[in-house]
Image (cartoon, rainbow, N blue to C red):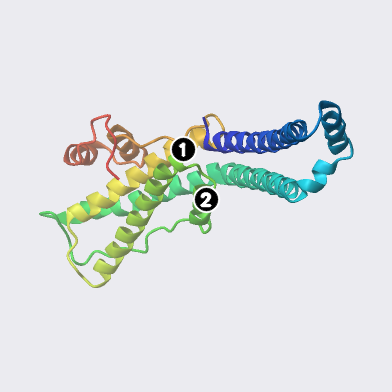
Protein backbone atom coordinates (compact mmCIF):
# COMPACT_ATOMS: atom_id res chain seq x y z
CA UNK A 1 0.00 0.00 0.00
CA UNK A 2 1.30 3.47 -0.88
CA UNK A 3 2.10 5.79 2.07
CA UNK A 4 -0.61 8.30 1.05
CA UNK A 5 -3.24 5.55 0.86
CA UNK A 6 -2.13 4.19 4.25
CA UNK A 7 -2.37 7.62 5.92
CA UNK A 8 -5.78 8.27 4.37
CA UNK A 9 -7.01 4.88 5.57
CA UNK A 10 -5.76 5.60 9.09
CA UNK A 11 -7.54 8.97 9.13
CA UNK A 12 -10.80 7.37 8.01
CA UNK A 13 -10.43 4.70 10.70
CA UNK A 14 -9.74 7.35 13.35
CA UNK A 15 -12.77 9.40 12.28
CA UNK A 16 -15.00 6.32 12.31
CA UNK A 17 -13.70 5.44 15.78
CA UNK A 18 -14.37 8.96 17.06
CA UNK A 19 -17.94 8.95 15.72
CA UNK A 20 -18.53 5.46 17.12
CA UNK A 21 -17.18 6.53 20.50
CA UNK A 22 -19.46 9.57 20.56
CA UNK A 23 -22.55 7.54 19.66
CA UNK A 24 -21.61 4.83 22.16
CA UNK A 25 -21.15 7.40 24.91
CA UNK A 26 -24.60 8.92 24.25
CA UNK A 27 -26.22 5.48 24.27
CA UNK A 28 -24.40 4.65 27.50
CA UNK A 29 -25.62 7.87 29.09
CA UNK A 30 -29.21 7.17 28.03
CA UNK A 31 -28.98 3.62 29.34
CA UNK A 32 -27.52 4.79 32.61
CA UNK A 33 -30.32 7.30 33.18
CA UNK A 34 -32.92 4.62 32.49
CA UNK A 35 -31.32 2.19 34.94
CA UNK A 36 -31.07 4.86 37.62
CA UNK A 37 -34.70 5.84 37.03
CA UNK A 38 -35.92 2.27 37.45
CA UNK A 39 -33.82 1.85 40.57
CA UNK A 40 -35.16 4.99 42.23
CA UNK A 41 -38.88 4.83 41.42
CA UNK A 42 -41.71 2.72 40.10
CA UNK A 43 -41.66 1.35 36.56
CA UNK A 44 -44.32 3.74 35.27
CA UNK A 45 -42.66 6.83 36.64
CA UNK A 46 -39.25 5.56 35.54
CA UNK A 47 -40.42 5.12 31.97
CA UNK A 48 -42.08 8.53 31.99
CA UNK A 49 -38.94 10.22 33.39
CA UNK A 50 -36.66 8.48 30.90
CA UNK A 51 -38.80 9.41 27.91
CA UNK A 52 -39.02 13.01 29.13
CA UNK A 53 -35.21 13.15 29.61
CA UNK A 54 -34.66 11.85 26.09
CA UNK A 55 -37.53 13.59 24.34
CA UNK A 56 -36.82 17.05 25.72
CA UNK A 57 -33.14 16.69 24.82
CA UNK A 58 -32.15 17.14 28.46
CA UNK A 59 -29.24 14.85 27.69
CA UNK A 60 -27.87 17.52 25.38
CA UNK A 61 -27.70 19.93 28.29
CA UNK A 62 -26.23 17.38 30.66
CA UNK A 63 -23.48 16.37 28.20
CA UNK A 64 -23.04 19.55 26.20
CA UNK A 65 -19.39 20.02 27.16
CA UNK A 66 -18.50 16.49 26.18
CA UNK A 67 -20.47 16.63 22.93
CA UNK A 68 -18.94 20.00 22.05
CA UNK A 69 -15.51 18.45 22.47
CA UNK A 70 -16.47 15.55 20.20
CA UNK A 71 -17.73 17.93 17.51
CA UNK A 72 -14.62 20.09 17.79
CA UNK A 73 -12.42 17.01 17.44
CA UNK A 74 -14.35 15.96 14.36
CA UNK A 75 -13.89 19.43 12.89
CA UNK A 76 -10.15 19.28 13.48
CA UNK A 77 -9.93 15.88 11.80
CA UNK A 78 -11.89 17.18 8.82
CA UNK A 79 -9.52 20.14 8.49
CA UNK A 80 -6.50 17.82 8.69
CA UNK A 81 -8.01 15.63 5.99
CA UNK A 82 -8.65 18.62 3.73
CA UNK A 83 -5.12 19.92 4.29
CA UNK A 84 -3.72 16.48 3.43
CA UNK A 85 -5.75 16.45 0.20
CA UNK A 86 -4.50 19.93 -0.72
CA UNK A 87 -0.89 19.00 0.02
CA UNK A 88 -1.17 15.83 -2.05
CA UNK A 89 -2.69 17.76 -4.97
CA UNK A 90 0.10 20.34 -4.77
CA UNK A 91 2.74 17.59 -4.69
CA UNK A 92 1.26 15.86 -7.74
CA UNK A 93 1.08 19.16 -9.64
CA UNK A 94 4.74 19.91 -8.89
CA UNK A 95 5.69 16.35 -9.86
CA UNK A 96 3.86 16.61 -13.18
CA UNK A 97 5.56 19.94 -13.94
CA UNK A 98 9.04 18.64 -13.08
CA UNK A 99 8.46 15.48 -15.09
CA UNK A 100 7.22 17.43 -18.11
CA UNK A 101 10.54 19.28 -18.51
CA UNK A 102 12.70 16.31 -17.51
CA UNK A 103 13.26 15.00 -21.10
CA UNK A 104 14.73 18.35 -22.15
CA UNK A 105 16.92 18.47 -19.04
CA UNK A 106 18.18 14.92 -19.65
CA UNK A 107 19.03 15.83 -23.25
CA UNK A 108 21.11 18.75 -21.97
CA UNK A 109 22.88 16.48 -19.47
CA UNK A 110 23.63 13.87 -22.14
CA UNK A 111 24.94 16.52 -24.53
CA UNK A 112 27.14 17.97 -21.77
CA UNK A 113 28.66 14.53 -21.11
CA UNK A 114 29.36 14.05 -24.84
CA UNK A 115 30.99 17.47 -25.20
CA UNK A 116 33.26 17.07 -22.18
CA UNK A 117 34.35 13.63 -23.38
CA UNK A 118 35.07 14.98 -26.85
CA UNK A 119 37.09 17.84 -25.38
CA UNK A 120 39.37 15.76 -23.14
CA UNK A 121 39.94 12.72 -25.38
CA UNK A 122 42.53 14.47 -27.59
CA UNK A 123 44.65 15.12 -24.50
CA UNK A 124 45.59 11.44 -24.43
CA UNK A 125 47.13 11.76 -27.90
CA UNK A 126 49.80 14.04 -26.41
CA UNK A 127 50.60 11.63 -23.61
CA UNK A 128 54.20 10.59 -23.01
CA UNK A 129 54.66 7.62 -20.67
CA UNK A 130 51.36 8.31 -18.93
CA UNK A 131 51.85 12.08 -18.67
CA UNK A 132 50.42 14.90 -20.76
CA UNK A 133 53.05 17.16 -22.33
CA UNK A 134 53.63 20.45 -20.53
CA UNK A 135 53.02 22.80 -23.45
CA UNK A 136 49.47 21.51 -24.15
CA UNK A 137 46.89 24.29 -24.20
CA UNK A 138 43.49 23.18 -22.86
CA UNK A 139 40.68 25.55 -23.72
CA UNK A 140 37.77 26.06 -21.38
CA UNK A 141 35.65 22.93 -21.16
CA UNK A 142 31.92 22.95 -21.99
CA UNK A 143 29.44 23.95 -19.29
CA UNK A 144 25.99 22.61 -18.56
CA UNK A 145 23.04 24.68 -19.76
CA UNK A 146 21.82 27.15 -17.11
CA UNK A 147 18.77 25.86 -15.30
CA UNK A 148 19.47 22.15 -15.81
CA UNK A 149 20.59 21.59 -12.22
CA UNK A 150 17.62 23.58 -10.93
CA UNK A 151 15.27 21.41 -13.00
CA UNK A 152 16.84 18.27 -11.57
CA UNK A 153 16.48 19.70 -8.06
CA UNK A 154 12.77 20.27 -8.73
CA UNK A 155 12.46 16.64 -9.79
CA UNK A 156 14.12 15.53 -6.53
CA UNK A 157 11.66 17.65 -4.52
CA UNK A 158 8.75 16.08 -6.42
CA UNK A 159 10.03 12.52 -6.17
CA UNK A 160 9.04 9.68 -3.86
CA UNK A 161 11.46 8.39 -1.25
CA UNK A 162 12.42 5.27 -3.22
CA UNK A 163 13.23 7.35 -6.32
CA UNK A 164 15.65 9.79 -4.71
CA UNK A 165 18.72 7.57 -4.51
CA UNK A 166 18.95 7.37 -8.31
CA UNK A 167 18.47 11.12 -8.69
CA UNK A 168 21.01 11.84 -5.96
CA UNK A 169 23.55 9.61 -7.71
CA UNK A 170 22.96 11.42 -11.00
CA UNK A 171 23.54 14.81 -9.38
CA UNK A 172 26.55 13.48 -7.48
CA UNK A 173 28.10 12.20 -10.74
CA UNK A 174 27.45 15.56 -12.37
CA UNK A 175 29.13 17.37 -9.49
CA UNK A 176 32.20 15.09 -9.60
CA UNK A 177 32.56 15.53 -13.36
CA UNK A 178 32.29 19.31 -13.09
CA UNK A 179 34.88 19.43 -10.30
CA UNK A 180 37.37 17.20 -12.10
CA UNK A 181 36.96 19.12 -15.35
CA UNK A 182 37.62 22.43 -13.65
CA UNK A 183 40.58 20.91 -11.85
CA UNK A 184 42.01 19.79 -15.20
CA UNK A 185 41.87 23.32 -16.56
CA UNK A 186 43.42 24.73 -13.39
CA UNK A 187 46.25 22.18 -13.44
CA UNK A 188 47.22 23.04 -17.00
CA UNK A 189 47.13 26.77 -16.39
CA UNK A 190 49.53 26.23 -13.48
CA UNK A 191 51.59 23.80 -15.59
CA UNK A 192 51.02 20.95 -13.20
CA UNK A 193 51.48 17.38 -14.40
CA UNK A 194 48.35 15.63 -15.72
CA UNK A 195 48.36 11.86 -15.77
CA UNK A 196 46.45 9.66 -18.18
CA UNK A 197 44.53 8.41 -15.15
CA UNK A 198 43.16 11.92 -14.60
CA UNK A 199 41.75 11.96 -18.10
CA UNK A 200 40.47 8.38 -17.81
CA UNK A 201 38.51 9.26 -14.68
CA UNK A 202 36.84 12.17 -16.49
CA UNK A 203 35.92 9.95 -19.44
CA UNK A 204 34.46 7.43 -16.99
CA UNK A 205 32.41 10.16 -15.30
CA UNK A 206 31.10 11.27 -18.68
CA UNK A 207 29.98 7.71 -19.42
CA UNK A 208 28.36 7.35 -15.98
CA UNK A 209 26.50 10.64 -16.34
CA UNK A 210 25.30 9.66 -19.81
CA UNK A 211 24.11 6.29 -18.45
CA UNK A 212 22.20 7.92 -15.58
CA UNK A 213 20.43 10.26 -17.99
CA UNK A 214 19.64 7.44 -20.43
CA UNK A 215 18.15 5.36 -17.62
CA UNK A 216 15.60 8.09 -16.82
CA UNK A 217 14.23 8.68 -20.31
CA UNK A 218 11.39 6.15 -20.12
CA UNK A 219 10.20 7.65 -16.84
CA UNK A 220 10.58 11.21 -18.17
CA UNK A 221 8.56 10.39 -21.29
CA UNK A 222 5.77 8.71 -19.29
CA UNK A 223 6.55 5.33 -20.80
CA UNK A 224 7.20 4.02 -17.30
CA UNK A 225 6.18 5.13 -13.82
CA UNK A 226 9.28 3.59 -12.26
CA UNK A 227 12.63 5.25 -11.68
CA UNK A 228 15.51 2.73 -11.93
CA UNK A 229 17.26 1.70 -8.75
CA UNK A 230 20.76 1.92 -10.25
CA UNK A 231 22.83 1.81 -13.42
CA UNK A 232 24.85 -1.32 -14.11
CA UNK A 233 28.52 -1.57 -15.03
CA UNK A 234 27.42 -2.65 -18.48
CA UNK A 235 25.34 0.57 -18.72
CA UNK A 236 28.52 2.55 -18.08
CA UNK A 237 30.35 0.56 -20.75
CA UNK A 238 27.55 1.50 -23.16
CA UNK A 239 27.92 5.09 -21.98
CA UNK A 240 31.55 5.02 -23.06
CA UNK A 241 30.50 3.98 -26.55
CA UNK A 242 27.73 6.59 -26.68
CA UNK A 243 30.15 9.34 -25.63
CA UNK A 244 32.35 8.21 -28.55
CA UNK A 245 35.05 6.40 -26.62
CA UNK A 246 35.98 3.53 -28.95
CA UNK A 247 38.69 1.04 -29.76
CA UNK A 248 41.63 0.38 -27.52
CA UNK A 249 40.84 3.27 -25.19
CA UNK A 250 37.37 1.88 -24.47
CA UNK A 251 38.77 -1.62 -23.93
CA UNK A 252 41.30 -0.21 -21.48
CA UNK A 253 38.64 1.60 -19.47
CA UNK A 254 36.27 -1.37 -19.46
CA UNK A 255 39.02 -3.61 -18.13
CA UNK A 256 40.43 -1.10 -15.63
CA UNK A 257 37.06 -0.22 -14.11
CA UNK A 258 35.54 -3.72 -14.51
CA UNK A 259 32.60 -2.59 -16.62
CA UNK A 260 31.74 -5.93 -18.19
CA UNK A 261 29.28 -7.14 -15.50
CA UNK A 262 25.59 -6.55 -14.92
CA UNK A 263 25.97 -5.65 -11.25
CA UNK A 264 25.27 -2.15 -9.89
CA UNK A 265 27.84 0.47 -10.71
CA UNK A 266 29.33 1.97 -7.57
CA UNK A 267 28.45 5.67 -7.51
| Marks 2/1: CA–CA distance | 16 Å
Left or right of 71 in this view: 91: left
- Residues packed near mark 2 inside 10 Å, few (<14), some (14 to 19) or many (20 plus): some
* Residue in the foreground of this view, choosing between 144 and 241: 144
Label 2 sits on a secondary structure element that is helix
Q: List the single residue furthest toward the top.
A: 43
The answer to whether marks 2 and 1 mark residues whose Cβ atoms lie closer than 8 Å is: no
Left or right of 150 in this view: 94: right
Q: Quadrant of the C terminus?
A: top left
Could you tell which of marks 2 and 1 lies nearer the N-terminus? Answer: 2
- The residue labelled by disc 2 is 157
From this view, report whether residue 233 is shown above or below residue 199.
above
The residue at the point 57 percent across, 33 percent down is 222
The residue at the point 24 percent across, 64 percent down is 136
- The residue labelled by disc 1 is 216
Label 1 sits on a secondary structure element that is helix
Amino acid sequence: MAPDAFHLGMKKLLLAGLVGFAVGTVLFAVGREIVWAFAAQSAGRAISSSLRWVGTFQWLYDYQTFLTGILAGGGVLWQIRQAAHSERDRFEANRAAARAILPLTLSEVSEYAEKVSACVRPILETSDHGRVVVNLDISDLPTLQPGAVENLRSMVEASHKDERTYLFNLLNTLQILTTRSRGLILDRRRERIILDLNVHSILLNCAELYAYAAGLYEFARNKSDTVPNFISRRDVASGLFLTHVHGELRDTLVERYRLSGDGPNDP
